Amino acid sequence: MKRLWWGFKVGFRVRKHDCATAAAPLAAAFGGRFGLPFAIPAPGPASLVKIISFNANGLRSAASKGFFDWLPGQHADIVCIQETKAQEHQLRVEALLPTGYTAYFRDATTKKGYSGVGIYTRREPDEVRTALGWESFDEEGRYIEARYGNLSVVSLYFPSGSSGDERQQFKFRCMEWFTPILDQWLASGRDYVICGDWNIVHTRMDIKNWTSNLKNSGCLPEERAWLDLLFQQRGWVDSYRHLRPEGQDYTWWSQRGAARAKDVGWRIDYQVVSPSLRDRLKACSIHPEPRFSDHAPFAVEYA
């Protein structure tokens, strides 16, 4: 297998924090600076903005398992979905359009019932973008961005390489291509929340069976070194690890071998934020139950 080598030392150090950080209340900052005066229903504190990221592994399937019955109780302001696995006209039906949200989707044009991303939002964004400029990536329905003032919220579904060498090489090319885009986003002065399934674990704390997976896609040294680059050198912030420096929670489990029942999982779903939002991270939660997908919803609250 030909692999790109990133030349970055694999390793990770984190500062210790409490799960709920001591960030100052930022209702005015989030509402005023970003133009996001979201009305969060009781009992959620009015000063918080809550964003959920969820790989549905088929949005219609997740709906049939009760996802949209569960969602109202979460009081989320924005919900980012990956793997809708449907075309947009199949998603614009009453059962998939929860009350109080506006929905935006980007489906795959390369193959029906494949990939696809979406964003549900309580406030209509100023702009929605669905392409980054590389057809091979864009047409697989892997990116959608909602813009609110100076804030961008992205739903991202990064490729998996687990099906074979061809897709792994495509994943490596995506890593190389996406890096300067992330650099441009940092340089833009905008505040970014990049929600999604990145299909990569970062450290041994993010996977149950570390040693046996070191040669498997999603845990390869090149992939983890790329996250080292983004988090340690570029300054992007892994919200979960910032809030839970010693946490060992997972967001995905294989559907084979009772992996979920044994909690043999991987943490591959992230909310990666620009450094400007580091101090606004307030709390996070992973919801493995009820089961709507082989992934669990991951929620972050911003103060």
Image (tube, grey):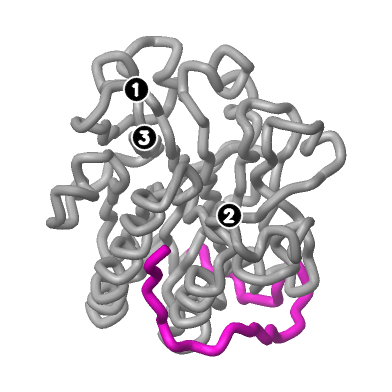
Judge whether 23 appears above or below 209 on screen: below
Dominant SS in magenta: loop
- Boundaries of the magenta span: 1-27
Judge whether 108 appears above or below 283 on screen: above
Was residue 6 drawn as part of the magenta stretch in this picture?
yes
Separation (CA) of disc 1 from disc 2? 22 Å
Separation (CA) of disc 2 from disc 3? 16 Å
Callout 3 environment at 10 Å: few (<14), some (14 to 19), or many (20+)?
many
The quadrant in which the C terminus is found is bottom right
Residue hosting label 1:
113
Secondary element at tag 1? loop
Nearest to the observer: residue 164 or residue 118: 164
> Residue 196, image x and y in percent?
46, 50
Q: Residue at x 53, y 17 (%)?
A: 61
Was residue 224 drawn as part of the magenta stretch in this picture?
no
Separation (CA) of disc 3 from disc 1? 7 Å
Quadrant of residue 142 in the image?
top left
Q: Which mark is residue 92?
A: none
> Residue 213, image x and y in percent?
68, 59
> Residue 54, image x and y in percent?
53, 40
Amino acid type, residue under disc 1 in the picture? Gly
Amino acid type, residue under disc 3 in the picture? Ser
From the viewer's perspective, tell me whether residue 292 is left or right of residue 164. right
From the viewer's perspective, tell me whether residue 35 is left or right of residue 52. left
Residue hosting label 3:
115
